[in-house]
Image: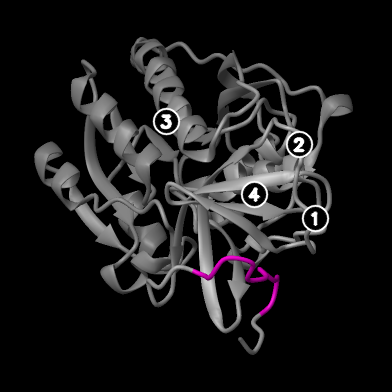
Amino acid sequence: MRAAVVGAVGSTAILLDELAKARDWEVPIVVTLPPELHGRHSDLVDLAPHAERLGARLFCTGKTNDPATLSAIDEAEPDYIFVVGWSQLCSSDFLSIRQDKVIGYHPAALPRLRGRAAIPWTILLDEKITAGSLFWMAEGTDDGDLLAQNYFHLAGDETASELYERHMTCLSDMLGEALPMLASGKERRIKQKERFATWATKRTPADGVIDWNESAKAIDRLIRAVGRPYPGAFCFVGKRKITVWQSALVAEANPYHAMIGQIVAREEGSLLVQTGKGILAITDWEIEDGKPPRLHASLRSVRDID
């Protein structure tokens, strides 16, 4: 079987690794972003070494549905096209290159959380169970028939990096079963149940701004949802931006009387901050000029004059 691969991130690399291991598969082309567009994804992976190892042509494009892109994929004569780790929509012209033979991966329990930023939304919504979904791409948004789906539980303190890695494992496991099945000529197609469908909207780095009026629990969830490999939650102290990568809830009774957003203590590199409800410990953070904020400084959602 011949597989064309379209993608640019960690999940794309997982797919290429699995195709390299699978019997009866070859990869004639890998479509990815050119170097000047690598900034589009915080979790971007350079796929050139993967393509070279597979003997595949590396085709770089910023436009999925550009005639040159469509032509390059078609000329590779794939039996299946895998679009994994690629945030652009695929047009009807793209899907018709190999009608009903285009496969995608979505890091959510489809039909739940169709759309964008599924991993951050999974944490923000405090989901208890999620899944990885391999599906047959159609013209709708993540609404094609399911090829495979693996469910797993989430921890109450799950972070984006942990959930990301769990999806990489989930994808690898599913491909280990799906690729031999497809190579044998079998295609599982299970219709999604529309009554359970929900949609997740696009998120941008700006959506990581911290509102200290929220509770410590809500802010901690935001920090966990948008941390590595994503751009991170952030706030400002004066003119300086602080990116917050990790935090911890403080279980003890609050002995401080402070304004919301005020740093009430510094303990072993952590900043203890008064929120709208409770104290939050910032345990991993970066500040623009590297100079730690002073004790009792106020953290804000917007830049201010220090």
Is residue 157 found left or right of 24 in the rendered image? right
Which of the two discs, 3 and 2, labels the residue nearer the N terminus? 2
Q: CA distance from mark 3 to mark 2?
A: 19 Å
On the question of residue 103 being in view, the answer is no
- Taking 203 as reference, is 180 above or below it? above
Residue 257: give x, y in percent of width and height. Answer: 80, 55
Which of the two discs, 4 and 2, labels the residue nearer the N terminus? 4
Q: Which mark is residue 116?
A: 4
**Marks 4 and 1 in Cβ contact (< 8 Å):** no
Circle 2 residues within 10 Å: few <14, some 14–19, many ≥20: few
Q: Amino acid at mark 3?
A: Glu
Magenta region, residue range = 293-302
Mark 3 — residue? Answer: 165
On the question of residue 194 being in view, the answer is yes
**Marks 1 and 3 in Cβ contact (< 8 Å):** no
Q: Quadrant of residue 41?
A: bottom left
Is residue 119 found left or right of 15 in the rendered image? right
Foreground mark, 1 or 3?
1
Mark 2 — residue? Answer: 125
Foreground mark, 3 or 4?
3
Asked if the stretch drawn in magenta spans residue 224, the answer is no
Asked if the stretch drawn in magenta spans residue 299, the answer is yes
